Image (cartoon, grey):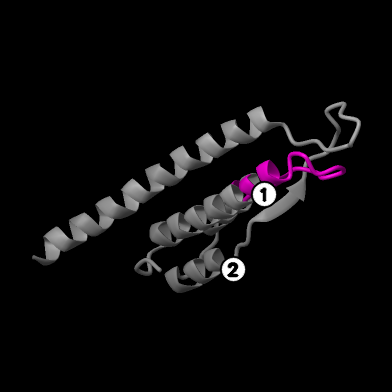
Amino acid sequence: MFLGSLSNTAMEKAMSGLWQRQRAINHNIANEDTPGYKAKRVDFETSLRQELRNLRTENVSARESISRLRRLNPTEYELEGLNGRIDENNVDLDSEYIEMARSQIQFNALEQRVNGYYTNLKYIIS
C-alpha cells in the first residue's frame, strides 16, 4: 500500500483495476475455444473518475476521501452480442490482445509514476 495521499490511493486503485482487467483478459484467451463462453471486461475508470469528481466538489476530509477511494471496486461484466460463431463463444483474440497491450502500457505508466514518487521521497530523505 502506498503512503496515505489521495493521488497515491487513486494510483493504487488504478493498478489494482488494471491487474483485474489483465486477469479477465487472460481468462478470455484461455476460454477462446469453450462453447458458450462470454468474454468478460473490467471497468474501474468510470467509478474512479466519478468518485474523484465527487471528492473535488464535496467538502470531505483527506482521510474520508482516501477511505472512499479504497472502497471502490472494479465492475466485471460480460460482453454482449455474438460474433457469428456457431458455438456462441464471443471471444475475439485480436480484441483481447489489443486490450492486453493497452492495459500493460497503462500499468507500466502507473508503475513508473509510483517508482518516481518513491525515488523522489528517497532523495528527499537522504
Kindly identify the amino acid type of the residue bearing the numbered disc 2: Arg
Mark carried by residue 11: none
Which range of residues does the magenta coloring cover? 26-46
Instruction: Return the residue nearer the eye: 69 or 65.
Output: 69
Q: Which residue is mark 1?
A: 27
Q: Residue at x 64, y 28 (%)?
A: 94
Which residue in the rendered view is the most extreme toward the front? 33
Image quadrant where residue 2 sits: bottom left
Assign the N terminus to one quadrant of the image. Answer: bottom left
Q: Is residue 98 left or right of residue 120?
A: right
Identify the residue at image location x=89%, y=36%: 87
Q: Position of residue 27 (x, y in %)?
A: 67, 49
> Can residue 93 be seen here?
yes
- Tell me the amino acid under the disc marked 1: His
Where residue 90 sits: x, y (%)?
80, 35
Image: 59 above or below 117: below
Front-most of 111 and 86? 86
Horizontal side, residue 56 vs residue 77: left or right:
left
Residue 86's image quarter?
top right
Bin the neighbour count of mark 2 within 10 Å (Cα to Cα): few under 14, some 14-19, many 20 and up: few
Residue nearer the viewer, 46 or 12: 12
Residue on which the image places disc 2: 71
Inter-mark Cα distance, 1 to 2: 25 Å
Queried whether the magenta region covers residue 37, the answer comes back as yes
Quadrant containing the C terminus is bottom left
